[in-house]
Amino acid sequence: MLRLFVLAAALAWGLAAAPGVAQAGTLDNVRQKGTIACGVNVGLGGFSMADSAGVWKGLDVDACRAVAAAVFGDASKVRYVPLTSANRFTALQSGEVDILSRNTTLTFLRDATVGLRMVMTNFYDGQGFLVRKTVKAGNVKDLAGATVCMLQGSTHELNLADWMKQNNIQFQLVLLDTTDVLIKALLSGRCDVASSDSSNLASIRGAGVPNPDDFVILPDRISKEPLGPMVRRADDQWLDIVRWSMMAMLEAEEAGVTSANADDMLARSTNPTVQRLLGKTGDFGKLLGIDNAWALHIIKQVGNYAESYERNVGKGSSLKLDRGPNDLWSRGGLMYPIPFR
């Protein structure tokens, strides 16, 4: 009887693992629903925030829009689910959302223990500190003994604990649920300092406080924060679709393909990379289980990575962040599009 059980289990495992055996996955589910459920920040300017008309915009929002363009040919087929730092992983694990695109840091522990997979980095960041100019602090060590507010469920608490131990300096930590609450605590004087990803602090300073010139972001960065979307484990097809949707935006920037010239490049370009990217040659969409024009839809409706960056967090936005490490590798940055073949 035991032998029969072992044989049956082995057969079941073999069928589940065998290439070409169809299994229901996220792609099938989102097609049935007709939309992609995208977990985003409850409100972080430049990354994910609804405007006065209820339209979500931001760098993280564009990641989900790119996947919708790839899957449906329509970047608008996304339902946005606002999530806090504390409940974001549970929402993805439970199936409430199909993609978590919420300024989330890739770490070893998260990758190995929470049952999720980081897709790729769409923004390289670091933990910084926002203070009033009246504090007259030149660096973090000048803040010894201060009360520091940060978001619960983020990597920032552990980062700062490590830094305090290494530098033998103590702070009083206050953990809060949302960025809105953090801003109120900072403005009321409950906190002397706000600590978060430097991009988050730039968003707070640029749009969250009434007098931006009263605040300064200190130059110190005490951590590396590679931010990007996450998906559930054991769904390689969906992981590939999300990853290559984002990679297509980087490849388009490197190849000079934009939302404005994509159709012309499709018709006229003899560059083999461009032809593959836009679906003129090869069956790259078919390999993902989607239309071969998937990347063309992304570029026309969302833009390449530079277009998304500039309008959301770059010089064309209120944050006015330099590209820095988020520039292409050929210009000294860390963004390196992986070849299609």
Image (cartoon, helix red, strand yellow):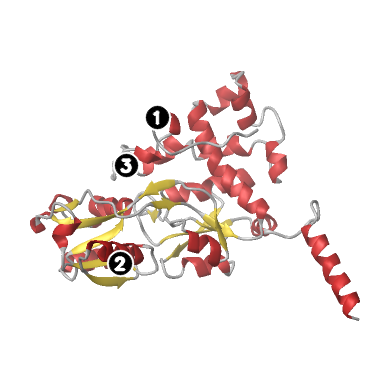
Which part of the image, by quadrant, shows the N terminus? bottom right
**Mark 1 or 3, nearer chain start:** 3
Mark 3 or mark 2, earlier in chain: 2
| Of 295 and 165, the residue lying toward us | 165
Residue at point 37%, 38% (across, down): 310
Q: Quadrant of residue 142?
A: bottom left
Task: State which quarter of the image contains the C terminus.
Answer: top right
Q: Of the numbered discs in the image, which one, if any, rests on residue 331?
A: 1
User: Do callouts 2 and 1 mark residues in contact (Cβ within 8 Å)?
Assistant: no
Q: Is residue 80 above or below residue 271?
A: below
Q: CA distance from mark 1 to mark 3?
A: 21 Å
In the image, 301: left or right of 84? right
Image quadrant where residue 280 sits: top right
Mark 2 or mark 1, earlier in chain: 2
Q: Nearer the viewer, residue 215 or 34?
A: 215
Foreground mark, 3 or 2? 2
Comparing 252 with 180, the one in front is 252
Q: Which amino acid lies under the numbered mark 3 shown in the image of this protein? A: Ser
Residue 332 percent across, percent down from the top left: 39, 32
- The residue indicated by pointer 2 is 161
Crowding at dot 3, Cα within 10 Å, few <14 / some 14-19 / many 20+, comes out as some
The structure residue drawn at horizontal position 33% and vertical position 66%, both measured from the top left corner, is 157
Closer mark to the observer between disc 2 and disc 1: 2
Q: Position of residue 182 (x, y in %)?
A: 27, 66
The residue carrying pointer 2 sits among few (fewer than 14), some (14 to 19) or many (20 or more) residues within 10 Å by Cα, namely some
Position of 91 with respect to 310 (left or right) is: right
Q: Give how far apart the Cα atoms at labels 3 and 2 are.
A: 33 Å
User: What residue sits 88% from the left and 70% below the top?
Assistant: 7
Q: Quadrant of residue 85?
A: bottom left
Which mark is drawn over residue 317?
Answer: 3
Q: Residue at x 42, y 51 (%)?
A: 226
